[in-house]
Image (cartoon, rainbow, N blue to C red):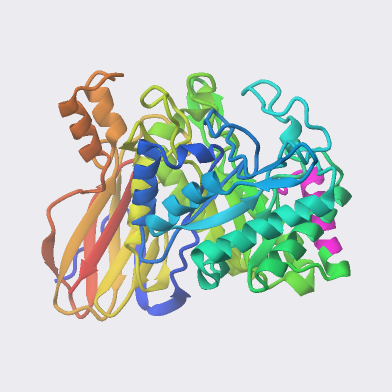
Amino acid sequence: MLLAPLLLALAVHVDTSQKLGPMQQIWGFFGYDEPNYTYTANGSKLINELGGLAPDPVYIRAHFLLATGDAQPALKWGSTNAYTEDAAGNPVYNWTVIDRIFDTYLHAGARPFVEIGFMPEALSSHPEPYQHQWPKSNFTGWSYPPRDYNKWSALIYRWVEHCVQRYGAPEVQSWYWEVWNEPDIDYWHGTPEEYDKLYDYTVKAVKRALPAARVGGPATTGPGSQRSSGFLRQFLDHCDKTGAPLDFISFHAKGKPALVDGHVRMGLAQELSNVQNGVDIVRSFPKFAALPIILSEADPEGCAACSAQHYPQNAYRNGPLYASYTAAALDGILNIAARSRANIAGMLTWAFEFENQPYFAGFRELATNGIDKPILNLFRMLGMMQGERVKTENSLATANDHAISVLIWNYQPEDIPQPAEPLALDVVSRAPDRVLMHHYRIDAGHSNSYSAWLRMGSPQQPTPEQYAELEAAGQLQLLESPRWIRSNEGRIQVRFDLPANSVSLVQFSW
């Protein structure tokens, strides 16, 4: 028997007969500033969790892979000492630390999204001062062009050659190689033309070592400003006119949260506007219109290391709001791709973990001191959605021969107490008379280590028992026990309440 209509409900309709193509894992990209966190105990733990999110490998991007230093991590800093020179000025290559980073990714089943940067001290055209001290003097000697482009090219060639020898050509061919990061702002103390020159030397070196390698850029900031959009456009114009190899195009997209009357108001519209502007620029070049686009940073705002303790507009980061925002952003990006016929192949979340910081300090991170935050459970949900995307309203849905998955979120940009909304889920399918329903939830009481930590009294030195409880609270949880429900000639109807900024994954299987 079908349920009677429910008044004033949020309606979610799914029609599995209308297929939209494979569910691409565009969300399966992650990144962070501090590469030396990768192989710490908490970093390695998190990398292994990322590697287990989905059947296909996720990609991981890190800054400072070529920076000079002692490999000691700090906020917004890292180093590998991959390149130095002897007293005679001859190159000395050392891949030990980079190997340790990439080995950690690959052992976990993930893959490197290799950001080629930054400038080694011995190659920098302005080397002193070199290492910065966050948050002061952040863009120092590592952000300058090379004093010798041929030596830079040799470094990149030797690096790719080493990776091929260590991991094999088929593996390295599956990676992305991205030239630099945000060269339209202070990450690059050179002109746009000097960046184009850097790109040319870099891509030739990569392709000389591995012709089938995937190389791209320019990884600019969000194309909302004239400076950023102009840089992206001139780079594409350069590649168009010179024939420089370009396998993918990357740029960034960021939102803009604000503190309004004592609470956080998110800024999703700006992030989606960045995406649309960048897509429009790419598609204005017919030669590149079909190339993969990687949003190699796509986030609610721009500074992962800016904690909510000092930037109260970032207080969204610990709870479910971060997860519901990201679900809404993913949906918006997929809609832009469909509407613009753009090949958006990646949406990279710039968040990882921070060592030696207080619990739940409000950094943009996936875990705190080894405790998973609610945002990570959104990616666990997405990794469980297999098959083809199917037509739906107010949600994302996939289906295959034996299962249907529906991701539903109640994104509310104002972080204030709001009532739950009644929801009516209506699925049209070829399901048999009885299906097994699993309902996973992220909200104040489920899949939420932050709320569990608050209930404990916010301990900064949790006991072993408390830590174990927080670890469990950080995992993806069911809203209710799995149960068999009836369908009527393949039509499935379910009702439940959806709190503000909660996320549900409802799966039907048979």
Q: Which residues are magenta?
A: 222-238
Q: Residue at horizontal 31%, vertical 65%?
A: 405
Of the pair 21 and 122, the residue shown nearer to us: 122
The residue located at (63%, 60%) in the rendering is 160
Where on the picture, by quarter, is residue 507? bottom left
- Residue 306, compared with residue 397, is above or below; it is above
Specify whether residue 221 is in view: no
Residue drawn at the location 53% of the way across and 52% of the way down? 348
Could you say which quadrant of the image residue 284 lies in? bottom right
Please say whether residue 224 is one of the residues in the magenta stretch. Answer: yes
Specify the farthest residue to the front: 88
Instruction: Give x and y (percent) for residue 17.
Output: 37, 80
Instruction: Using residue 45 as the reference point, say whether residue 194 is left or right of it.
Output: right
Quadrant of residue 14 in the image? Answer: bottom left
Residue 214 in view, yes or no: yes
Residue 116 vertical position relative to residue 391 in the rendered view, above or below: above
Q: Quadrant of the C terminus?
A: bottom left
Name the spot of residue 449 as percent of width and height, x first. 28, 34
Percent of width and height locating residue 107 = 38, 56
Using the image as rendered, state which of residue 12 and residue 79 is in the foreground: 79
Residue 326: x percent and y percent? 46, 47
Is 318 situated left or right of 428 in this image?
right
Of the 4 image quadrants, the one containing the N terminus is bottom left
Q: Main secondary structure of the magenta part?
A: helix
User: Quick check: is 22 in the magenta stretch?
Assistant: no
Figure label count: 0
**Observer-nearest of 175 and 258:** 175
For the point 35% across and 50% down, which residue is it?
Answer: 48
